[in-house]
Amino acid sequence: MSLVRLNIKGISYSQTQNGAYALILSEVDGERKLPIVIGAFEAQSIAIALEKEIKPPRPLTHDLFKNFADRFDIVVKQVIIHKLVDGVFYSSVICERDNIEEIIDARTSDAIALALRFQAPIFTYKNILDQAGIYLKVNPKKDDETDQEEFLVDEMVPDVEMVGKETSYTDLSLDELNRMLDQAVNNEDYELAARIRDEISKRD
């Protein structure tokens, strides 16, 4: 079976299903998206890894694993989402130490959080993408906007909307945003911190 490389497109959350998040993966050489439901902790861990400028005051679990692996010369080479059963994705982490390769079973959310920290590629099999991949509609372009996809996420995962759409920071000053950012990081709310950092970056 042929492998298809995936990129992380974003994280979404449900306003009606408490604690429900969806990780959106997209195929590199195609237009299909693969939505995977994940937990709140894993969503925060992935969000903090995507937002390079936010540094948690203490290592998260996946950061600890990365530090542990670095200390013992273990490298994550790639992650493969290899099975889909009853809506649940199963993944393997391909590791290497002393030129010996090992395959470790992992939850897909944990595997992707580690892949980000090791800058390892993420793959799935073509038949899984054929089974669960979705073509998203793209909203028409608006005046003076860059060529950017806006997902209709509710078509992928019921009652899910993109993170951050419900909150507007446009009326806040940079000083207020920076104070909110510091508070979010101190509270270890890294998903909120990533959204605030995005708003600050827009103004730089």
Image (tube, grey):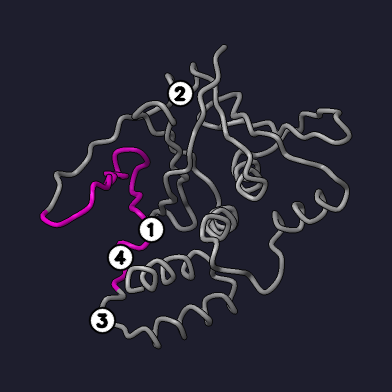
> Are discs 2 and 4 less than 8 Å apart at CB?
no
Compare marks 2 and 4 and give the one earlier in the sequence: 2
| Disc 4 residue type (three-letter) | Glu
Q: Which residue is mark 4?
A: 166
Picture coordinates of residue 194, whole percent (x, y): 47, 65
Picture coordinates of residue 196, whole percent (x, y): 41, 71
| Disc 1 residue type (three-letter) | Val
Q: Is residue 143 left or right of residue 2?
A: left
Q: Which residue is mark 3?
A: 171
> Are discs 4 and 3 less than 8 Å apart at CB?
no
Q: Which residue is mark 1?
A: 163
Residues rendered magenta in the picture? 143-168
Taking the magenta stretch, the answer to whether it contains residue 155 is: yes
Q: Which residue is mark 2?
A: 129
Res. 188 image quadrant: bottom right
Q: Name the residue furthest left.
A: 143
